[in-house]
Amino acid sequence: MSLDPAAVRRIAKLARIRVDDAELPVLAGELNSILGWIEQLNEVNIDGVAPLAGAPGMTQALRADVVNDGGYPEKVLANAPDREGDFFTVPKVVE
Amino acid sequence: MISDFTLAGARAALRQRDVSALELTNHFLTAIDTLNPVLNAFITVTPDLARAQAAAADAALARGDHGPLTGIPLAIKDLFCTQGVRTTAASRILEPFVPPYESTVSANLLRDGAIFLGKANLDEFAMGSSNATSAFGPVINPWTRAGDNRQLVPGGSSGGSAAAVAARLALGATATDTGGSIRQPASFCGIAGIKPTYGRCSRWGVVAFASSLDQAGPIARTVEDCAILLGSMAGYDAKDSTSANLAVPDFAAACRRGVKGLRIGVPREYRSDDMPAEIETMWQQGLSWLRDAGAEIVDVSLPHTKYGLATYYIVAPAEASSNLARYDGVRYGARSQGADLIDLYENTRAEGFGAEVKRRIMIGTYVLSAGYYDAYYIRAQKVRSLILQDFTNVFAKVDALLTPTAPSAAFGLGERMDDPLKMYFNDVFTVPANMAGIPGMSVPAGLDANGLPLGLQVLGKPFDEETVFAVAQAIETAAQFTTQPSIRAKG
């Protein structure tokens, strides 16, 4: 399968990255070249193979469901590009 | 001569009070002042902090109170969050970010007395194999071809760490490896580097790229220096749910074990017709050194090797697209303005990320998107299972594997930039270890016809870094690699 500029625009939208219309065909070419090369995995017989999601031999670590960190809003907000009091700010979302 | 010190040698000199931590630190800060304008190995240098840490180290040494790294000046890859010191991941989007916390690995180094000279350059978000994707400019390899002063890449993504150590701007450095980012730059810069087993070092406070593959490790000039550093960096951390709750062995002692009686596998799939003859020759030389030291060489097969890279370029971008979703211009990092919230996100990410990072986020977004998830992502995870199975099978028969680290020596700045796939092939020999989570180390073994360093890679069983160190040490001892790069600090 091959991505056309409209498909690249849709992916960019999902990825929340603005892409100028003029860049779409270039990006489509680059992404198609990578995806075309990845197609080689279709040669591999994967019948009956279980997917490996992470490093092998890991068990899920659990901890007590209690608050064990926090209480320092100044540290949390210290790197905010914009803030009001103890809040992060964004452009108005609800009219 | 301070520039000639290995980390182990400097440690002995500090303990004997032949040199002070402040003398060492001032020496390296001066060397950085002189050579960083040429090499661009550091994004941020922290002289005041380093001198304060050096004064504390000298006070500790005067009391006879020395930790494993007391007074040892290091470079820290700018992917490790350092409290109060800007941490950029070599991206515009993190340019203003000053972490209010310290990564576990760097905190472990500070606990053991290390001095931090500054933050080393890297490919943006550790995505690259030449350090050319850094938003703070490329790093230059301290090595040049004989009779040719054109600039070469140091490899990547830990290019700043590798260049700093090779040029004698630090005694060692932290690095990270998602697909080869410790081993390939170590090979390109003629130094040693180990990616330990996944879970050996905590990922807490390390800017995430692909969480099931990322692993921290050291870069240094000798195998023993890497062992000393890894001993401090490693260890269980409850703040990383994938951290292994295992005791940290004495890695430095393991370097002295020798290889007598070890079975070393040679995976036949790592050989290809287009491999440069001198890499093949060096590989054979490495096997013959190990045979002479008492090891038995065994031919083995890892049949899914050729699919490692393609699998990686699904799994790593998928995880990256998820991890990098956090950079939205709201809570930290750079923000670009927008008419509404979506606009703000899209502008922030368009202006904050470089071209390679955007490409990988988009590939990842696509392979995880509805309708394509099974065809790409699940299929890749199944092939990943097969790659792991290959290693499990061979490690039932051998103790370690020996391969070349990279398919070439360092290449020219600006080369292989026209096609992303060409750059990806740098990692063909290193990626499988990340897919399987096993340890891998690059050790300098020789020079190519142009006088550039070439590395050999030792791969080991999960959590058996000790055998990896023993084998790497045997190669280092036999190789007698003493050539130094043309650009380096002196005195």
Image: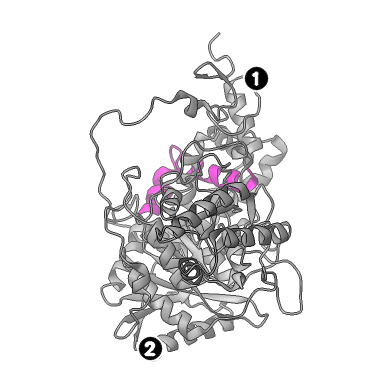
At 76% across and 75% down in the image, what residue appears?
A: B148
Residue B85 vertical placement versus B425 (above, below): above
Q: Is residue A11 above or below residue B264?
A: above
Count of marks overlaid on the render? 2
Q: Residue furthest top?
A: A95
Q: Residue at x 57, y 34 (%)?
A: A10
Q: Position of residue B342 (x, y in %)?
A: 58, 24
Magenta: main secondary structure equals helix
Mark 1–mark 2 Cα distance, whole angstroms, equals 68 Å
The residue nearer to you, when weighing A32 against B294, is B294
Which chain is disc 1 placed on? B
x, y (%) of residue B369?
Answer: 46, 38
Report in which chain the residue with disc 2 lies: B
Q: Please say whether residue B319 is one of the residues in the magenta stretch.
A: no
Residue depth check, mark 1 versus mark 2: number of the one nearer the observer: 2
Q: Is residue B367 magenta?
A: yes
Where does label 2 land, which residue? B293
Neighbours of disc 1 within 10 Å: few (<14), some (14-19), many (20+): few
* Amino acid at the residue labelled 1: Ala
Residue B263: which quarter of the image?
bottom left
Closer to the camera, B182 or B30?
A: B30
Residue B181 in sight here: no
Q: Is residue B374 left or right of residue B366?
A: left
SS type, badge 2: loop
Write down the residue under mark 1. B339
* Image height of A21 relative to A60, above or below: above
Looking at the picture, which amino acid does disc 2 mark?
Answer: Ala
Badge 2 crowding class, 10 Å Cα cut-off, few under 14, some 14 to 19, many 20 or more, is some
| Image location (x, y in percent) of residue B27 | 63, 62
* Numbered range of the magenta stretch: B354-381
